[in-house]
Amino acid sequence: MLKKKQKKELKNFDTDLAKFVPQDLINQAKTEAQKEIFKLKLAELRQNQGIKQTDVDGFSQVSVSRIESRSDIKISTLIDYVHACGFDVEIKAVPRRNKKKEEFVLLKA
């Protein structure tokens, strides 16, 4: 008689990872991942507008390249860059643990 195969229960990746990796390393990896995503989104923002690096008003191609490869940027530079790409900036504060998900707008530019 064949044994019934037991189904493996799929669990949350974060939960499974926490069993093997210290939480501080997980948090550090998430922070680094967010920085990389931010860089990609800046370039994507410009590209979706059909703007070449050489055509961003007020910025040289070298400056645009540096901005898009930085993981940390001054808010004033971000605002200028986003404006040059034809967008506005809105920075919000969102509670981490509050289920209401109230958002507080900190900056509209």
Image (cartoon, rainbow, N blue to C red):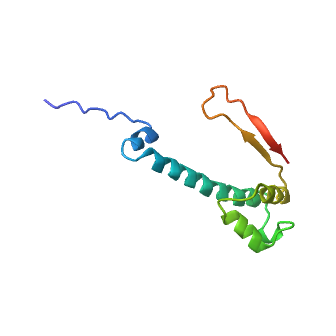
Q: Locate residue 97: give its quadrant.
A: top right
Residue 27 position in % (x across, y down): 51, 47
Residue 28 position in % (x across, y down): 52, 51
Residue closest to the far front? 24
Residue 41 position in % (x across, y down): 68, 55
Tally of marks? 0
Residue 71 position in % (x across, y down): 64, 60
Residue closest to the far left? 1
Q: Is residue 47 left or right of residue 88?
A: left
Q: Residue at x 76, y 44 (%)?
A: 91
Q: Residue at x 62, y 55 (%)?
A: 35
Q: Is 53 drawn above or below residue 83 in the view shown?
A: below
Q: Is residue 7 left or right of residue 76?
A: left
Q: Is residue 103 left or right of residue 85?
A: left
Q: Locate residue 76: give its quadrant.
A: bottom right
Q: Residue at x 81, y 44 (%)?
A: 107
Q: Is 2 drawn above or below residue 24 in the view shown?
A: above
Residue closest to the far top? 100
Q: Locate residue 50: give its quadrant.
A: bottom right
Q: Is 33 drawn above or below residue 95 in the view shown?
A: below
Q: Residue at x 35, y 33 (%)?
A: 9
> What is the quadrant of the N terminus in the image?
top left
Q: Is residue 2 left or right of residue 94?
A: left
